[in-house]
Image (cartoon, rainbow, N blue to C red):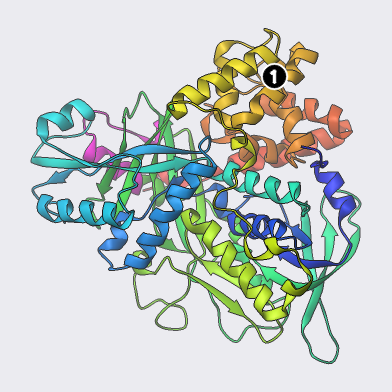
Amino acid sequence: MSKNTSRQAMWDALGEPVDLLIIGGGINGAGIARDAARRGLKVALVEARDLAYGTSSRSSKLVHGGLRYLQQFEFSLVFEAVSERRILLDIAPHLVRPLGFLFPVYRNSPHNLLTLKAGMWLYEGLSLFRSPKRHRKLGVRDVAKEEPALTREELKGAPLYYDCSTDDARLTLESALDAAAHGATIATWTRALSFIKDEESGRIQGAVVKDMLGDGGLKEIRAHAVINATGPWTDRTRALSAEPTSTLLRPTKGVHIVVDHARLPVNNAVVCFHPDDKRVLFAIPWGEQTYIGTTDTDYKGDPGQVYAEASDVEYLLTAANDYFPEHPLTADDVIATWAGLRPLMAQGSASGADISESEVSREHQIVVGEDGLITIAGGKLTTYRRMSAEVVETALKMLRLGDHLPETVHNPRTDTSPLPGAADWPEAESDDEAFELIAQHTLEASQGHLSELSARFLAHTYGTRAPALGELVAVDPELGKAVTEGRPELFVQIDWAITHELAATLTDMLVQRTQIFYRAADQGRQAAPRIAAHMAKKLGWSEEEVDQQVARYLHDVDLSQRWRRDYDAL
């Protein structure tokens, strides 16, 4: 990648007038930046922390059509989602992978097999029969073979259908990197403090932003249009302009817990209905781990301090133990938790409180304020690309920006152009074969300094960019070593993330660039000082800064484990 995509280089490039200034570096902000940059617009994106810091790295990590939305008759949402699922499979095969979903039906289940059969055909019909694989109806014996850990007491059968899993943080990251490759400036750890307004019209013409990592310097960014894509912080960002007369959002909290796969061995995402309130949730295979989620409860606190509570963990353990009684889980089995906020649109009353959390629509909304601020809120991870295009089209129509732009303004080709890790994807009979080819190229690029296992791991993480990491290992074989014993992550990933992926803090590295925070048995506590010391060589940190970075990361780990303080009191 020719453009310098270190965080410092991006901050240094910030300040020139732009067509669009995007506030928020989640999946929507990154998608908007990618779409706009590919149209030839001059784009700047500022994010107060790291890319995908909030909701976009704390989702259920699924790219799916939303089978359950059929029950709510949201056919347009399902059609849009299954169409986008197909596109993401094509443009990001290294990040979006087919995943089986098993839907067990018991005698007391809220759905019967006949209804589900009709729903499956409707679901595949809405996808124009382009699902990753065709659904199948499994009898009790077939279910026992497919998911031996699942209880078969009063089981009637189970459809098996297919959606996709993803690495939500990397999907966000690669969308932003593609935007940068097309000229966008992506400035993380850059907080928007206030808006710049025209004195006569009161319309927003840019923002004053602050460097949150360096000397705290300020910059003014003038823009034809400013877009608010701050997810759970949407209403707070609107308040920078004027006190809103109403709130747009009704945030709901979703919690997931992570356990070792050996403790809960599932082969597919198993659809579960909670025995207490019949809410739908999933037990999802995740390599050496399994995660369970999600909850859905209203949240009114600070979006930056959301965490799993003891009641959330107990709720998920109860569901898991109901469906998998021969593999009982306790609090001691929980490796990690994550909690994210769904930035859902308020409905009904002013707060939307007259309908339940699960009934709140997942549809998105684009709002243009009297001050000209364009706000995107609501929506689903799966449909981010389409939502992003709608936002950019809104800006173009409002400001008539298309007059001075090239023909690409109306066709950014975000639906056919691959994300960076899928560029030059190998021609192969299957994606599995493609990954093997990439792994082989990575191994060759490292000149034998990577193991075959590490080469495969890099291929599945970085796609066609993996050989570039292999080349770094060839120059410095020490980079091919694991950062922590028993884990696959390598030191070369640390260097690559700093120079090519905007990583600037220890938390960036362990939460968003790798998954050590979620997957390591100790959530990376022991490795944190070692990784921080390695980062210090690249970023020029002092010993004091290293200590501060470790302390901040351990605070994040402690926040994810805070539920344990109250668990025994339940």
Main SS, magenta residues = helix
Please, which residue is most extreme toward the front here? 407
Q: Considering the image in quadrants, where does the N terminus appear?
A: top right
- Please indicate whether residue 36 sits to the left or right of residue 129 in the image: right
- Whether residue 181 appears in this view of the structure is yes
Please state the horizontal and vertical placement of residue 405, each as a whole percent of the image: 76, 67
Q: Around disc 1, counting alpha carbons within 10 Å, would you say few (fewer than 14), some (14 to 19), or many (20 or more)?
A: many
Q: In the rendered image of this protein, does residue 167 appear above or below residue 459?
A: below
Name the kind of residue labelled 1 in the image.
Gly
- Please indicate whether residue 303 sits to the left or right of residue 23 in the image: left
Q: Which residue is mark 1?
A: 470
Q: Is residue 12 magenta?
A: no
- Whether residue 563 appears in this view of the structure is no
Span shown in magenta: 315-333
Of 226 and 293, which appears nearest the observer? 226
- Please indicate whether residue 539 sits to the left or right of residue 456 in the image: right
Of 217 and 379, which appears nearest the observer? 379
